Amino acid sequence: MRYKNYIFDLYGTLVDINTDEWSAQLWKKMAILYGYYGAAYTFKELGKAYGELVEQEKKAVRQRHPAYTVIDIKIEKVFRALFTRKGVKPKKATVPEVCEVFRCFSTKYIKLYDGVTELLDTIKTNGGCIYLLSNAQRTFTENELNMLGLTPYFDGICISSDEECSKPDSHYFQILFAIISPTSAAPRILVLTACISIRAFRPRSRASCAVTSPSWTAMFTRSHNTFLHKQMPAQRKQLCRQKLL
């Protein structure tokens, strides 16, 4: 194999997902749920409070990490604050459950792109190590990785909410690179990701390869290797021919 380490993005690369976190129907359901626990909100009041608390948490993260250019928050802090704003102290298990319900209600569909498991199987069969670097909320993503059967493939997982830092901030990349290669030696890495973050992977010791959807292809320069999701089985063969797998 030309490369030992393979870094994947998740949403838009391995997983096709469509969510709507601002529909009135979602917030009506969430208002009922919070009401079950004694935190009475109208759905409009709840949605507004959620937005306010998200901004407050972002401000707090920026103060904690002034060097970060792109931050992330732990969304469970927001869902907990929605209880405390109404004078309710939730049980330890309640907040994770509310996060799961929110994600479930806001997800229109979620599925693997065709050929994903075959691609990952090929890498593992050839002795490669697979890592995940995703802008995501652990409280949402961990369940989805397990549900879709992806968790066992990864030798390491980095989720932005854990680090309070997101792509394309270079600090976030360095966290994963340190996991892959704790020594000072730079590892040879093939990065398979979406267009929003591929430009950040430009060190000489690393290669970048975009596995993306057809609507994104015009955004890439000729220097990128670009493969379409609708051709995922063919991508695996092409990567093998180029000795990238």
Image: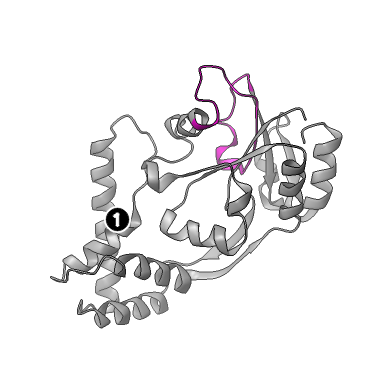
Q: Residue 63's image quarter? A: top left
Is residue 36 found inside the magenta-colored segment of the image?
A: no
> What colouring style does the render use?
one colour
Q: Is residue 58 left or right of residue 114?
A: left
Question: Observer-nearest residue: 6 or 209?
Answer: 6
Q: Relative to 82, is 69 on the left or the right? A: right
The amino acid on which the numbered mark 1 sits, given as a three-letter code, is Val
Badge 1 crowding class, 10 Å Cα cut-off, few under 14, some 14 to 19, many 20 or more, is some
Q: Residue at x 56, y 64 (%)?
A: 18
> Is any part of residue 12 visible from this angle?
no
Instruction: Please provide percent x and percent y for residue 146.
Output: 56, 60
- When the figure is inspected, residue 108 is found, relative to residue 195, above or below; the finding is below
Figure check: 193 above or below 190: below
Where, by quadrant of the figure, is residue 47 drawn?
bottom left
Q: Position of residue 168 (x, y in %)?
A: 48, 36
Toward the left, the furthest residue is: 87
Q: Is residue 203 magenta?
A: yes
Could you tell me which residue is drawn at 35 percent across and 80 percent down? 28
Comparing 102 with 117, the one in front is 117
Name the residue: 26% across, 82% down: 36
According to the picture, the residue beneath numbered tag 1 turns out to be: 54
Q: Is residue 78 left or right of residue 14?
A: left
In the image, which residues are magenta? 179-205
Measured as percent of width and height from the top left, residue 71 is found at 37, 41
Nearest to the observer: residue 37 or residue 46:
37
Residue found at x 61% / y 44%: 194
Q: Position of residue 64 (x, y in %)?
A: 25, 37
